[in-house]
Amino acid sequence: MNGANGYTLKIEHENILFSYSHISPNFVVELGDYINKGEVIAHVGPRYLDEDQKNPYKDPIGHPTNGSTTGTHLHLGIKIDGKAIDPIPLFHE
């Protein structure tokens, strides 16, 4: 768990850090794996998780959620040299 971001997968390549948040706790890849372009690395969701004592996030009726969220979605973060960038231009190349 990564706080409000829920389950998060981080991938490092040279000076670039990619983070994928609010993903399934059943990761497809493991620590130390090499990732190839187009490879499935994780699945989005679920919104709800089993009880986790370390998870303070719950919906209005008390169900534990995958971080601070109201529904299944993905947060993509990219940092270059430790500085966050807008990832949208990368999808237009």
Image (cartoon, rainbow, N blue to C red):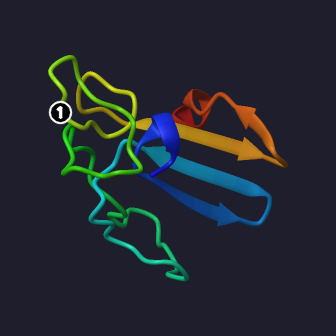
> Is residue 46 found left or right of 91 in the rendered image?
left
The furthest residue to the right: 81
Instruction: Tell which of 11 and 92 is nearer to you.
Output: 11
Residue 51, above or below 88: below
> Is residue 50 found left or right of 6 in the rendered image?
left
The x and y percentages for residue 40 are 32, 63
Residue 56, above or below 20: above
Asked where in the image residue 62 lies, by quadrant, the reply is top left
The x and y percentages for residue 30 are 43, 77
Instruction: Tell which of 61 and 38 is nearer to you.
Output: 61
Instruction: Tell which of 89 and 24 is nearer to you.
Output: 24
Label 1: how many Cα within 10 Å (few below 14, some 14–19, many 20+): few
Look at mark 1 in the image and give the residue it sits on: 63
Rendered residue at 28%/29% (across/down): 58
Asked where in the image residue 65 lies, by quadrant, the reply is top left
The x and y percentages for residue 45 are 24, 44
Determine the secondary structure under disc 1.
loop
Rendered residue at 59%/37% (across/down): 90
The furthest residue to the front: 53
Rendered residue at 41%/43% (across/down): 6
